[in-house]
Structures are given as structure tokens and as C-alpha cells.
Amino acid sequence: MKQVRFTMIGGFLGAGKTTTLARLARTYMSRDLRVGLVTNDQAQDLVDTMSLRAQGFAVQEVSGACFCCKFDELIARTADLEEAQRPDVILAEPVGSCTDLVATVVQPLKDLYPGRFRVAPYSVLFKPSHGLRILRNESAGFSPKAAYIFRKQLEEADAIVINRADELRAVDVQELKTLLSDEFPGTPVQLVSAKTGTGFDSYVELLDQDGAFGRKLLDIDYDTYAEGEAELGWLNSSAHLTSDTEFEIDPLLVRVIDRLRPVLATLGGEVAHLKVIGLESGGAFGVANLVSSATGTELSLASISKAREMDLIVNARVAVDPVVLEHEVHMVVREICAAHGISAEFRQSQSLRPGRPTPTHRYATAR
Ligand SMILES: Nc1nc2c(ncn2[C@@H]2O[C@H](COP(=O)(O)OP(=O)(O)OP(=O)(O)O)[C@@H](O)[C@H]2O)c(=O)[nH]1
Ligand SMILES: [Mg+2]
């Protein structure tokens, strides 16, 4: 097997990892490189996998736990990609509530598979909506334990990549750069927009570097980490929608998020990321997102299509009881569908709080 560049892109829930993976994949493909992607989640029915596949990429997924706890499955899924796609580059997206990835994924990859993978610098995307408040030591809507995870993710990064340059004011960028260099001195900070591509030339250059990367091992308290993760209610639900008359896909997706926003606000649970994909049998698809309680609904990928039959998948990561989350999501989807003469049949639903991470490997010293 040829040696594959393994590039993992970290960052908190909703930071822009999937958008970044898609942009990087297109960049590498335009250089005639073959690319495979690996997604990861605590449960099945991943919006990210479906959205990336619908965009035409070769994607494998590890579901049921994070890469660190399912390391062997990560290796098996990359082997599937290697066999089928012969990729030059594998881009991997870990779960956004996961940290300690250098000790549990990067180091084992380097140590156990030196001939198979050439591991890229580990970059972590910075999510401004929650991150600015966390770095200012203000409440971001989560408990201090979730903020602890957010900080640990940045601490182990070879480079911190501030995302959403298209939205940030110059004054916020300046403040963020100051806060980041005070708290993580010596860590390079870049500014990008995964949406527009701003800053990606330098980002790709950074990811192409080889050297003493992936060596920042954390001193981390797994109790705090586990409790911070378990604060989040996790829901992956899929429904099949049918209607006698055609309905527009995109407004329906936006309506689901718009309606859930006040419902979740009433419950007092901060939204980490709420995403919904509509997949029509002919291949049309759209994605709508909400990345915090303080921001607005985004139609990140528009289908500009109508459907009579469609799969609707909701992935929600919100600081509320997962049973309540499931109930509210199902109610909202049913209500909206009923109002438009659409019948909605829920086929699969998993609601949970992430369990305590028990990594397959954990390196205490860097190789
Ligand atoms: N304005 C703007 N929006 C962005 C940018 N990058 C990502 N987004 C939006 O942010 C939302 C979340 O992006 P994703 O790429 O799904 O984030 P993620 O980190 O993969 O999220 P999880 O997989 O849930 O952890 C989507 O609505 C994206 O369109 C950006 O640079 N600018
Ligand atoms: Mg994602």
C-alpha cells in the first residue's frame, strides 16, 4: 500500500469541520490527488456523511463512539478507503465534543502505522460564536466543563484556525488573536472562511508541512471531560416524508430549525449544533443548520428542488435532556409536515448522552 497523508481536522461542534473537509477535498482533487474522507459520531445516521456523499466524495464513517474509543474501526474504515479509492489523502473529522486526540489518535497512528500514514499537523478550527465568550471567561451557555473541553481542544492543536472570517469584524479578529496568543502562546493562529475559501492557500500550506507536529500531549482530567460531554443531549433521527403534491425542500428544512429554535430556548438548553438534511430520491439534497442559540438559521447547502418523497435526518447536539430533545424534534417535524400536507414516518431515532471516553490507546509521551 502507498503511504497516505492522514489529515485530521478538529474543532468544537459546529466549528465548520465538515465544510472545511469538503473545501480541502476539492482543493486536493484539483491538484489531481485522490481523496477519501472519514466522518465520526456518537450515533448512526450522520448528516455529515450523507451531505459529503451527496457532494460526490468517497466517505466512510465511524459511528457509535469517537475515533479515540474506536481506533481500530478508524483503521478499518481507512483500509476500506485505501482499497476502494487508493487515496493520496485521507481527511478525517472527529466528534466535535472530543478532545485528547493527539494522545489517542495522532500518536498511535504515527507509532503503529509509520509506513502507512504520513500524519499532517493537527489543526483545530475555532468557533467564534461560542469561542469568543469562552476565551473572555463569559458564559457561552454551557457549563464550565464544556468550556474545559473547548479549551483542551485548542491546547493540543499544532495550529488554531479561526473560522468564519467572512462574518467576523476586524475588531473581533484582533481580540481573538490577542486572547489566543495569551492563552496558547507559540501556537500559530490562522484566519479562514470555510464558506468562501479566504485564507485556504495558507491553511493548505500549513497542512502540507512535515516536522515535529502532533506532539502536544494534554494533562487532562477525564472526569471533567466526561461530565462536560455528558452535558449534551445527542439526537440522530431519520424520518421518511411523503406527499401527494410536491413541496419545496429548502424552506421545509429552514422551518424545522426556525421552529426548534424558540422551543429549545424555552427549555434553556444552549445549542451546540443542530443540523437537518433533506435527501430526495433523485439525488437533490439540502442542509440547514443552527450553531448556537444566539445565531440565526443557515441554509448551508441549498437543494433548490421540490420533492414528493424525501428522507429527513436531524442531528441535534443541545444542552438538554436527550429524551426531551427527541420528543420536541419529533413534535416539530410532525407539526410542520402536517401543516404542509406531508406525512412523516420516523424510521430510526437514537437519543443519548455521550458516555465516558475510554480510548483504545493513550500515549503519555510523544514518539
Ligand atoms: N458564515 C460562515 N459559515 C460557515 C463557515 N464554515 C462553516 N459555516 C457554517 O457553519 C455551520 C456548521 O458547519 P459544519 O461544517 O457542519 O460544522 P462541523 O464542525 O462539521 O459541525 P459538527 O460536525 O456538528 O461538529 C454550517 O451552517 C456551515 O455552513 C464559514 O466560514 N462562514
Ligand atoms: Mg461536521
Image (cartoon, rainbow, N blue to C red):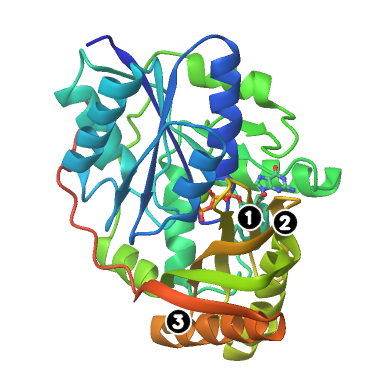
Distance CA(mark 3)–CA(mark 2): 22 Å
Given residues 35 and 241, the one toward you in this image is 241
Label 2: element kind: strand
As helix, strand or loop, the secondary structure at mark 3 comes to helix
Name the residue carrying label 1: 287
x 62%, y 61%: residue:
130
Q: Considering only vertical position in the picture, is 12 above or below 166? A: below
Q: Please tell me which of labels 3 and 2 falls first in the chain.
A: 2
Q: Which residue is mark 2?
A: 299
The residue identified by callout 3 is: 326
Q: CA distance from mark 2 to mark 1?
A: 6 Å
The mark nearer the N terminus, 3 or 1, is 1
219 or 162, nearer to the observer: 162
Quadrant where the image shows the C terminus: top left
The kind of residue tagged 3 is Glu
Q: Is residue 36 or residue 224 the one in the foreground?
A: 36
The answer to whether 91 is drawn above or below residue 12 in the figure is above
Give the residue at x 33% y 60%. Answer: 42
- Do the residues under discs 3 and 1 have CB atoms within 8 angstroms? no
